Amino acid sequence: MIQAEGVAVVTDTDFATEVLTSERPVLVEFTADWCPPCRQIAPVLSAISQEEGHRLKVVQIDVDTNPETTNRYGVLSMPTLMVFQGGEPVKSMVGARPKRRLMQELEDVIGA
């Protein structure tokens, strides 16, 4: 697992280890290099990773180089943000959004 802008990067190979078996909820960004909204939300995810890392793990996975995981979860649009808890996806959001709105959408998962 490597870091990109403060957010861990996962692959098809380590997705199960890093996401599905995590003790904390995991926010996964399905992203692509060619995606402008993905670049737009990158600083938001980096800030949330730094501020909420004790309650929420934040990772990203490149859809172009990791088709197995992308297809398994039916991801068609970028960025797709998916929250996993206990090895299962519990929330899915599509598109970039401001930090405040994203935190509001995550409240039910990580608590206020």
Image (cartoon, rainbow, N blue to C red):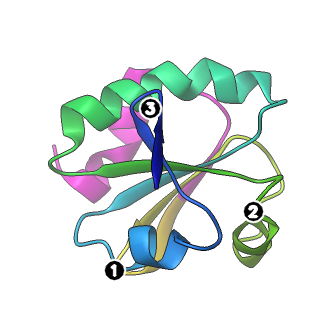
**Does residue 101 show up?**
no
On the image, the x and y values in percent for residue 61 come to 62, 52
What segment is highlighted magenta in the picture? 92-112
Tell me the CA gap for discs 3 and 1: 21 Å
On the image, the x and y values in percent for residue 68 come to 77, 74
Please give the count of numbered marks on the rendered protein.
3
Q: Amino acid at mark 2?
A: Asn
Tell me the CA gap for discs 3 and 2: 20 Å
Residue at 73% in and 78% down: 72
Question: Compared with residue 42, is residue 49 higher up or lower down, i.e. above or below?
Answer: below
Q: Amino acid at mark 1?
A: Gly
Under circle 2, the secondary element is loop
Residue at 49% in and 78% down: 16
Check disc 2: other Cα within 10 Å, few if <14, some if 14-19, many if 20+.
Answer: some
Question: In which quarter of the view is residue 34 placed?
Answer: top right
On the image, the x and y values in percent for residue 29 come to 57, 47
**Does residue 83 show up?**
yes
Q: Amino acid at mark 3?
A: Leu
Check disc 1: other Cα within 10 Å, few if <14, some if 14-19, many if 20+.
Answer: some
Residue hosting label 2: 66
Q: Which mark is residue 67?
A: none
Query: Which quadrant holds the C terminus?
Result: top left
Under circle 1, the secondary element is loop
Question: Compared with residue 65, is residue 35 higher up or lower down, i.e. above or below?
Answer: above
Q: Which mark is residue 45?
A: 3
- The answer to whether mark 1 and mark 2 are in CB contact below 8 A is no
| Marked residue nearer the N-terminal end (3 or 1) | 3
Under circle 3, the secondary element is helix
Residue hosting label 1: 86
| Marked residue nearer the N-terminal end (3 or 2) | 3
Please tell me whether residue 97 belongs to the stretch shown in magenta: yes
Tell me the CA gap for discs 1 and 2: 22 Å
